[in-house]
Amino acid sequence: MSPRFAPGAAVRVARERPAVSRGRQHIRTPHYVRGLTGTVAEVVGPFRNPEGLAAGEDGLPMQVLYRVRFPLGAVWDRYGGDPSDTVDVELYEHWLEPAHAA
Amino acid sequence: MPHDSPHPDEHDHAPDDPSFASRPAIGARALRELLEEAGVLAPGEVARQVERMDTITPALGARVIARAWVDPAFKAWLLADGSAAVRTFGVDMGATPLHVVENTETVHNMIVCTLCSCYPKPLLGIPPDWYKSVEYRARAVREPRAVLAEFGVRLPEGVAVRVHDSTADLRYLVLPRRPEGTEGWDEARLAQIVSRDCMIGTALPHA
């Protein structure tokens, strides 16, 4: 399977659960980045979807996993650190959509 | 003060090890017995895994870091394919690839798992309790510099903090910078200054 996003691409994390994830109990997308725009730092590759694996299923279709970078100043109001500080979060492709502004 | 207890008879009923009779412990034991009955687990399998895990300590990770400090080719391999590189130390990362992040003059890396407590156990062993605490997990992404300061880490001007939230399939290891004053040290001596926290990113090695 070919990744939808390349390193450097601006991506937005879904605010609501994507269709694939509805009714799931084992969501790996942290709430603090939902709805936010980040930059693809690395395309890790395809993995079985843990949302299905946790329910005893085969986790297929596989989902491409990315490491997506967010400036902490954009994640938190009144972030007290340095503007250069960032967080990298592992996110699966079905939670991401293209964004135009990083 | 054994004679101060107002209810000395209670000791007759207290188990030797209270944790052994706790609700989670009883639940875990019941689950293990059911899985053994169903043939999912072999008898003793859990105990053997626990024993095996207890033999792994951060000293193993420290040897990997020391090798990377003295051997540029190994360092490049470790950064490109962590799981393959640590296999030369007998470490099997299993289904969770090892992702090594390098501290530089301008970037300091720090690892957390905000969702649970993901940690490179095959390389570092069991994580410290604070790594699993709600406080560390919440604050590492919210105010990493304040957390670092509490660990005694003050970064020079111009160094960005790069937090890695270990939310899914990767496990992370920080490759610290080799400190000044260690020129000519051999691998064994270098490994001595690489603590567990250096490899989580909440400490810096010192000569």
Image (cartoon, coloured by chain):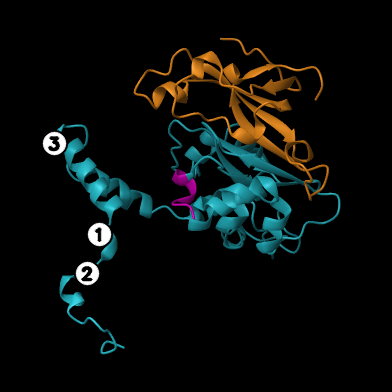
Chain colours: A orange, B cyan
Magenta stretch: give its range.
B121-128
Q: Which quadrant is home to the N terminus of chain B?
A: bottom left
Query: Sequence order check: which comes first, mark 1 or mark 3?
Result: 1
Q: Output the chain of dot 2.
A: B
Q: Which residue is mark 2?
A: B16
Residue B76 location, x and y as percent? 66, 36
- The relative height of residue A33 versus residue A65 in the rendered view (above or below) is below
Mark 3 is surrounded, within 10 Å at the Cα level, by few (under 14), some (14 to 19) or many (20 or more) other residues, namely: few
Residue B125 falls inside the magenta stretch: yes
Dot 1 and dot 3 residues touching (CB under 8 Å): no
Spatial separation of the CA atoms under disc 3 and disc 2: 28 Å
Instruction: Indicate whether B94 appears above or below B178.
Output: above
Quadrant where the image shows the C terminus of chain B: bottom right
Name the residue type under label 3. Answer: Glu
**Which residue, given by chain and number where applicable, does mark 3 sit on?**
B37
Q: At numbered mark 1, what does the secondary structure look like: helix, strand or loop? A: helix
The residue sitting at the top extreme is: A1
Determine crowd level at label 1: few under 14, some 14-19, many 20+ residues with C-alpha closer than 10 A: few
Element on which disc 2 rests: loop
Q: What residue is drawn where x is 73% and y is 59%?
A: B179
Who comes first in sequence, dot 3 or dot 2?
2
The residue at 63%/33% (across/down) is A89
